[in-house]
Image (cartoon, rainbow, N blue to C red):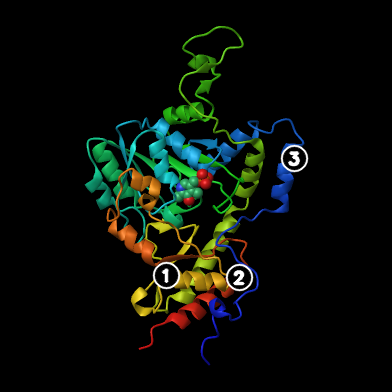
Amino acid sequence: MGPSKLALYGGKPVRDSYLPYGRQWVTDDDINSVIKVLKGDYLTTGPLVPKFEEAIAEYVGADYAVAFSSGTSALHAACFAAEIGKGDEVIVSPITFVASANCVLYQGATPVFADIDPKTYNIDPNQIESKITSKTKAIIPVDFTGQAVDMDNIKKIADRYGLHIIEDAAHALGSEYKGRKIGSLADMTEFSFHPVKPITAGEGGVITTDNEEFYKKLQLFRSHGITKNKKDFFDSDGPWYYEQQALGYNYRITDIQCALGLNQLNHISKFLYRRRKIADRYNQAFCGMQEVNIPFEAEYSNSGWHLYILRLNMNLLQADRKDIFEALQAENIGVNVHYIPVYYHPYYKKLGYKKGLCPNAEKLYEDMITLPLFPKMTDQDVEDVIAAVKKVIGYFRKQV
Ligand SMILES: *Cc1c(COP(=O)(O)O)cnc(C)c1O
């Protein structure tokens, strides 16, 4: 019996309904916690903002947390707190969401892309070192897919050159490095609460840190650079007085979002458990297939599996990545590609970045594909993904 006809060519798809690559899992008690806020006194900054911040700080083991309207605004605030500005360079990974590099541009500084390790897909510490100049101020490593970055080696470099580390852990709430939760390893660590991320607040983000000075600057930046704290005032006028000390933004998170985020945090171990189970099942299903490579996990990392990426072995397939992508989409499997190298985007090209900058990242981009992975997937959803991959790869397998 040959493989059944691909949906791409008019065959019956593996499943009838479309399965996205990621989505939230919002429970009735999440919803009730939000309704309670809507019936109360505070919609925006109220008691739930510090409560959510304390819960996140405790969960990751950091001294402080400052919550923001998004992971992106949190990264921007971290760049401000680290005093990154015009003329400075910041080393970033090319395989990430654009926000990891845009936050450097917001501050008028220059992102410098350092290539990835071809096994972990995370920024390679040796590549970081080769990009350091007298202008380098910080490093923004990304725990891509939830896999922890090689932090001890990144720290050694940061210490040697006096650089700050801002860890982009948007994928990695609950992930561990050498048995320790990510969140207090770097100078500042950012998490995101976008619906596809480990937990959601609708939109939202946070910076965790052990540094009190950063903590104060982050709070200032979140709300127009204004402080109402009398003992921090430079001037004083009357009991109505508040003081703008820096150019900040309105990057505040609402109590509505924090209610959802706080309640979602109750589910995180269940979510992580399920994500790891699904990743195990995928690994088991695909490890024997020569045409694909399953993800590699470094021994120092315990990933929360935000994303599951297969690398296609193009020389064993009589198709390109686009054909396989389209064939899987036609089977109603919401595959994706994470990510287009940041500097491929026209905005970055216009700034002068060129192809060829990070060969390992560019090679990865050619042959990777993200499979659906989120905790609310049923066992049947998981088996559908496996069946569709086997069907499509089976069809395009080179005959020898
Ligand atoms: C999601 C994400 C962000 C930004 O988070 P938002 O909350 O969507 O602003 C930053 N970096 C990475 C790697 C992300 O995946």
Q: Which residue is mark 2?
A: 381
| Mark 3 vs mark 2: in front | 2
Label 3 Cα neighbours within 10 Å, binned few <14 / some 14-19 / many ≥20: few
Horizontal side of 307 relative to 93 (left or right) equals: right
Label 1 secondary element: helix
Mark sitting on residue 321: 1
Which residue is located at x 46 percent, y 12 percent?
234
Q: Name the residue that disc number 3 marks.
A: 36
Q: Amino acid at mark 3?
A: Lys
Tell me the quarter of the image containing the C terminus.
bottom left
Looking at the rendered image, the disc whose residue lies closer to the viewer, 2 or 1, is 1
Residue depicted at 51% across the width and 15% down the height: 231
Q: Is residue 362 visible?
A: yes
Amino acid beneath label 1? Arg
**Residue at image location 54% in from the left, 33% down from the top:** 251
Q: CA distance from mark 1 to mark 3?
A: 48 Å
The crowd level at tag 2 (other Cα within 10 Å; few <14, some 14-19, many 20+) is some
Against 323, residue 303 (above or below) is above
